[in-house]
Image (cartoon, helix red, strand yellow):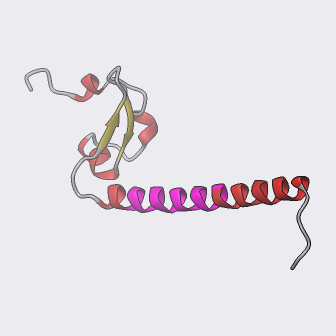
Amino acid sequence: AGRRWTPAEQSFAVSVANLVSLMLSWRAQAQSEAALRAIVESEPECVKIVAADGRLLDMNPAGLRLLDTDRESEVVGRPVADFVHPED
């Protein structure tokens, strides 16, 4: 029979386990986001993320090429309507 843990030791062990679990979760999320980013960046078609108010939040390189730019800073934050031909 081993020694019994005090409530403080048990609480500390649970806190450490929770912290390790959280860190592993963050790491998995970061890896998943990196994989998704790689897919979107290599997609040959335009991929964009638009806010509910219609502002452009993100666009992949293919979309930027359609707009004749390679700089996200020129398009991010602007209304998507700014980039749509009036007759479309």
Magenta stretch bounds: 22-38
Q: Where does the image place residue 6, in percent across and percent down from the top left?
A: 91, 58
Which of the pair 3/39 is nearer the observer?
3
Q: Is residue 35 left or right of residue 10?
A: left
Residue 64 higher or lower than 20, as above or below: above
Residue 68 higher or lower than 78, as above or below: below
| Magenta-span inclusion, residue 28 | yes
Q: Where does the image place residue 23, in percent across and percent down from the top left?
A: 66, 58
Q: Is residue 16 left or right of residue 52?
A: right
Q: Is residue 33 left or right of residue 23?
A: left
Which of the pair 15/62 is nearer the observer?
15
Q: Where's the N terminus, which quadrant?
A: bottom right
Total residue callouts: 0
Residue drawn at x 64%, y 55% is 22
Q: Where does the image place residue 5, in percent across and percent down from the top left?
A: 88, 63
| Magenta-span inclusion, residue 47 | no
Residue at the farthest front position? 1
Residue drawn at x 42%, y 62% is 35
Residue drawn at x 9%, y 26% is 88
Q: Main secondary structure of the magenta part?
A: helix
Residue 30: quarter of image: bottom right
